[in-house]
Image: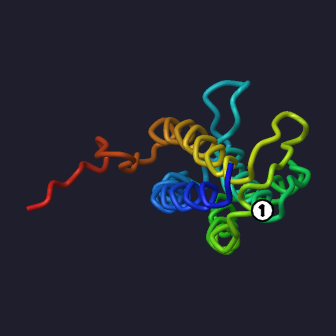
Amino acid sequence: MSPEQAKHMAEFFVSVIEMETPTTRKIIAAVPEGKSGYRPDAKARSALELARHIPGSDIWFLEAVSNGEFGDFSPAAEEKITTVAGALKVYDEQFGPALDKVKALSGEKLANEISMMGMFNLPAVIYLSFLIRHTVHHRGQLSTYLRPMGSKVPSIYGGSADEPMEMPG
């Protein structure tokens, strides 16, 4: 992949990430603090585990791209977040600056290959696509928890029964 291709891909992926971020934040914010231990099955993550995993892993992917390597993904770091408000605080304070670092990268840096824990060896920019899909996957899981916890489901890609889509007037 050429540096020019990597830079163009990064611009596209960043625009998608920026478009998805407000929706992701709305889903996390909709988790009722008093019911954050909810899980639909014993094997499923709790709502809090998902709410803190999304910001933690998003920031991990962004830092890997900007640093040119994946650091250790530490569940202990996520476990320090004990509330939904804490997860939102991490998202609000750390996600934007991490994304800004990626935006500032050169095409050369974005085209450099990075090993993801020995499983993949891909140009750094490709991990932005991983970030998008990973976030949407876990956000979808978390959105299905909301009604059973007594919360409302925000609109995601269109209206929901709780937040109908409003057509331009």
Residue hosting label 1: 63
At x 68%, y 43%, the residue is 37
**Category of crowding for the residue at label 1, using alpha-carbon neighbours closer than 10 angstroms: few (below 14), some (14–19), many (at least 20):** many
**Image quadrant containing the C terminus:** bottom left
Q: In this view, does 117 lie to the left or right of 159?
A: right
The residue nearer to you, when weighing 104 against 81, is 104
Instruction: Give the image quarter of residue 43.
Output: top right
Q: Is residue 8 left or right of residue 60?
A: left
Q: Is residue 154 left or right of residue 31?
A: left
At x 81%, y 49%, the residue is 113
Q: Is residue 9 left or right of residue 122?
A: left
Across and down, in percent, residue 55 comes to: 68, 57
At x 80%, y 57%, the residue is 64
Q: What residue type is labelled 1?
A: Glu
Across and down, in percent, residue 18 comes to: 50, 62
> Farthest residue toward the left?
169
Q: What element carries label 1?
A: helix
Is residue 93 visible to the viewer in this orientation of the structure? no
Across and down, in percent, residue 45 comes to: 70, 35
The residue nearer to you, when weighing 6 against 77, is 6
Count of numbered labels shown in the rendering: 1
Q: Which colour scheme is used?
A: rainbow
At x 86%, y 48%, the residue is 75
114 vs 92: above or below: above
The residue nearer to you, when weighing 103 against 33, is 103
81 vs 138: above or below: below
Across and down, in percent, residue 76 comes to: 89, 52
Is residue 25 visible to the viewer in this orientation of the structure? yes
Instruction: Give the image quarter of residue 109.
Output: bottom right
